[in-house]
Image (cartoon, grey):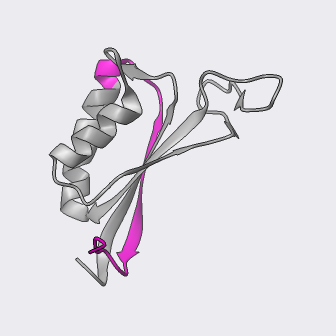
Amino acid sequence: MENNPKAKLLRIFIGESDKLGSVPLYEALVYSAKKQGLSGATVTRGIMGFGANSKISTAKLFTISEDLPLVVEIVDLEDKIRSFVKIVEQMFEDANSGGLITLEKAEIIRYRSMK
């Protein structure tokens, strides 16, 4: 999959406290991406942010939030990403979760495991 200019970057913005049943939503998303055979997924925890509810979450020392923003990023070929978006939308529904899903162009320069 190296040097593929037709890849897509899927970004899923959620809150740390979002759950799918008893499992954190970010964890369910990553395991689902792996099950679907996607190339990989990364979860990044934000130190501050707000979403559609306009509530600011922050990791400041004296106001530790229990709902920091998280971003799940996945890069793969467009058809695989678009198929996975349908799964993500259903997971959002099942979790009764808000959030944001974006899709951007990406060019894969290098994708290899370490030997």
User: At x 22% / y 37%, what residue is drawn?
Assistant: 87
- One can see residue 9 in this view: yes
**Which quadrant of the structure image shows residue 31?**
top left
Between 8 and 28, the one lying in front of the other is: 28
State the residue at coordinates (16%, 53%).
Answer: 37
- Is 74 or 23 nearer to us in this picture? 23
In percent of width and height, residue 25 lies at: 38, 28
Asked if residue 51 lies left or right of residue 5, the reply is: right
x then y, percent, for residue 1: 22, 76
| Residue 4 coordinates in the image, percent (x, y) | 28, 80
In the depicted structure, whether residue 51 falls above or below residue 109: above
In-image side of 19 versus 80 (left or right): right
In this view of the protein, can residue 86 be seen by the observer? no
Q: Quadrant of the C terminus?
A: bottom left
Which residue sits at x=62%, y=42%?
46
Please tell me which residue lies in front, 69 or 89: 69
Q: What residue span does the magenta drawing correspond to?
A: 93-115
Picture layout, residue 115 above or below residue 25: below
Compared with 7, 62 (above or below) is: above
Q: Residue at x 19, y 57 (%)?
A: 80
**Is residue 64 highlighted in magenta?**
no
What x and y, as percent, mark residue 34? 22, 47
